[in-house]
Amino acid sequence: MNDVSLDQLTFDQFHALLDSKFTVRLDPSNSVELELVEAVSFSGPKPTTPAAANRDYERFSLVFAGPEQQPLMQKMHPFEQERLGAFTLFIVPIRQEKGRLYYEAVFNRLVTPG
């Protein structure tokens, strides 16, 4: 699977994959499957500092659900998704509900032109 930089992945690409499966590699022979259950884009006021005022920022969050039996720690994890490729993502456990564990990844980044 091709490695892809998170800088190349956008909110729209993730949003198009709602309800899709992502594989998290625990080690070369072990993995956990997570489902992308929520993708939320945040809009808000532009930064007020002169240096940042003319720049565009992308802010969004992703929520994944996975099996209760295989909890993942808060840290960087290697993800794979057949349409996106392989990338590393920092996720944080946020809740446990109805036999599933939920994890969130938050993006708050400067959008580079091009």
Image (spheres, grey):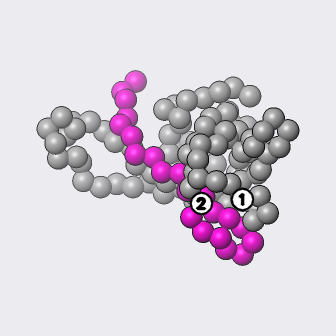
Q: How crowded is mark 2: few (under 14 residues within 10 Å), some or many (20 or more)?
A: some
Whether residue 113 sits left or right of residue 27 in the image: it is left
Q: Residue at x 26, y 36 (%)?
A: 55
Mark 1 / mark 2, whichever is N-terminal:
1
Q: Distance between the residues labelled 1 and 2?
A: 9 Å
Q: Residue at x 64, y 48 (%)?
A: 17
Residue 71 got which mark? Answer: 1
Q: Give the range drawn in magenta.
A: 94-114
Residue 49 magenta-highlighted: no
Residue situated in front as seen by the camera: 65 or 76: 76
What residue is shown with label 2?
93
Residue 36 percent location from the top left of the image:
64, 54
Judged from this view, the residue extending furthest toward the bottom is 98
Front position in the image: 14 or 25: 25
| Amino acid on which the number 2 mark rests in the picture | Pro
Any mark on residue 40, and which? none
Residue 26 shows in the view: yes
Pointers 1 and 2 in contact (C-beta within 8 Å): yes
Q: What percent of the width, then of the height, locates residue 97? A: 67, 74
